Amino acid sequence: MTEKVWLKHYPNYIRANLDYEEIPLQQFLTNAARNTPEKIAIHFMGKDIKYKELHESALKFAQYLQQLGIEKGDRIALMLPNTPQTVISYYGALYAGATVVMTNPLYTEREIEYQLKDSGAKVIVSLDILYPRIMKVFKNTALENVIITSIKDYLPFPKNLLYPYVQKKEQGVQVHVAHSGVSHQFMEILKTSQAIEPTIDFNFEEDLALLQYTGGTTGFPKGVMLTHKNLIANTRMCAEWLTEPNAQSEPPVILGILPIFHVYGMTTVLLYTVMQGGKMVLLPKFNAEMILKTIQKQRPTLFPGAPTIYIGLINHPQIKKYDLSSIKACISGSAPLPAEVQEQFEELTGGKLVEGYGLTESSPVTHANLLFENIRQKNSIGIPWPDTDAMIVDGSIERPRANGEIGELVVKGPQVMKGYWNRPEENAMTLEDGWLKTGDLGYMDDDGFFYVVDRKKDVIIAGGYNIYPREVEEVLYEHPDVVECVAAGVPDPYRGETVKAYIVLREGATTTEADLNKFCRENLAAYKVPRIYEFRAELPKTAVGKILRRALIDEEKEKQQQPRQEQA
């Protein structure tokens, strides 16, 4: 096995081995409420929520879930943006002994139905505006109850009164859900329930805290089983890595732009904040001006994000008007971080921005560059986190590659998933003697720094979102005029990659790009919809008829390079 040469770069304030509390994840909220009840836990659009209130609300929610018949191990789906309700229902589900199933609010009916059926979730918590979408698939799932809330429920006066008018203007509709039958109003639950902590026996290593869905080379989303131990371990690693040496012991203020329904945002925003007894500043969607104003007013110290977020802020014409000096540390994930973006953002804030690496199956972080040391390797994902081992192999952990040689990156540590939900064959292919095969190609240099040279063969990473070509292709194939198609990620200066669809239409068909775009938008989340369509008479194939997606990607890269070469 590989010698941990990277440990020589660890400064004296980062330990190579950590201690992990053998407690359920929700105990950190109990501790924070007991130790600092009056401290602000959440700031949301002008409203502050203290730890005491957050804790009591989570316990009330847990009690209501038990009244609905939820037992230990049952799955509770949360389909919410970054709001206080997300935090309350997340911890409430854990207090009730349930497993949380994070669900993207952008999902279409078919995507919601698939995830709910696969997870077997009995309850879903969502926004009023999404209620009609849920009810259309309700009978096809294991759902028994739907809990509905609204953005306005936690807005301060007078924003809470104005929001319904804003919603109607933006969405074109208002939804009113009665607190009866299988439908329940979130705020009514908190009014009528008692804040009593349920007595649940927990197994730190075995009990699932989270089912986080991700795709794979097959394109079918899989539930990643993350235990209380997995998430506590990665959050503790996060705390070790992000603590500034010789800094005052004030708890962090964390800017929550990353969606909590993604494991990256969940760990670095929600879990890390509560574990540290800090304050999370939640924003429900990306708006550059709103983010800049919030940074100036709320003074966050930690800003986890993705390259597209930092690029969006850097390019805001008024960015120099705002005081961003509170930011001390930023870890960028989900896509490669361009060096010029790193340099510009550090110059504008005075803080440190470095690239990290992870995946859903590792809760998610395994590597990062050092924040507060002058050690940087260009284009590197950094070095492994505490208690994390990594190496480059040739197909199996029994065949490690030499330094500098490209192979598959594999990782091992307490943050690595228990496995995929009901996918024994996938587990056998992905886990080998405790090692997680990432599917990413890379190498390690002689100094212990790791580099990723190519993402999983087919996955498109656009704006930090993972998009699986087969999901897009299956929708396109449902169109009656599409004979053949392939979806591929092509270079995009802003999103990193964007989805391009190559289409062969049936003879005589007159379907246009606009027709296909409309069709896809009805059946796919917005970020998965192709941005470019190209109609062809035929697609390149192997001798056995397999479409050569990589050939199309290479062709696209060549086309994009030609204008630059001509200018040069």
Image (tube, rainbow, N blue to C red):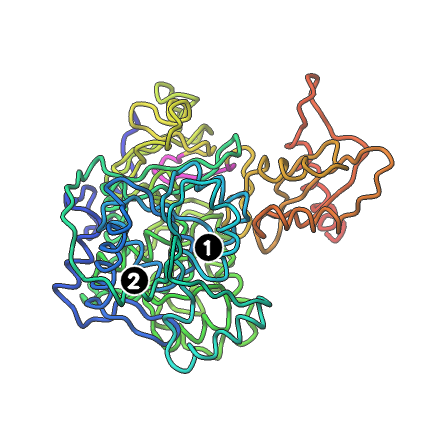
Local SS, label 1: loop
Residue assigned mark 2? 189
Using the image, determine if residue 345 lies above or below residue 105: below
Region in magenta: 444-455
- What residue is shown at x 70% (from left), y 20% (from top)? 545
| Residue 3 at x, y percent in the picture | 27, 30
Badge number at residue 538: none
- What residue is shown at x 46% (from left), y 55% (from top)? 306
Instruction: Work out whether mark 2 precedes mark 1 in sequence or the reverse, and give the earlier one.
Output: 2
Using the image, determine if residue 135 lies above or below residue 317: above
Q: How many marks?
A: 2
Quarter holding residue 6? top left
**Which of label 2 and label 1 is nearer to you?**
2
Residue closer to the observer: 563 or 194: 194
Q: Is residue 172 visible?
A: yes
Local SS, label 2: helix
Distance between the Cα atoms at labels 2 and 1? 35 Å
Using the image, determine if residue 323 lies above or below residue 568: below
- What residue is shown at x 68% (from left), y 17% (from top)? 544
| Residue 440 at x, y percent in the picture | 46, 34
Residue closer to the observer: 31 or 345: 31
- What residue is shown at x 67% (from left), y 36% (from top)? 478
- Can you name the residue that lies furthest to the right here? 508
- Residue 451, magenta (yes or no): yes
| Three-letter code for the amino acid on which mark 1 is drawn | Ala
Viewed as shown, does residue 235 lie left or right of 406?
left
| Residue 299 at x, y percent in the picture | 34, 73
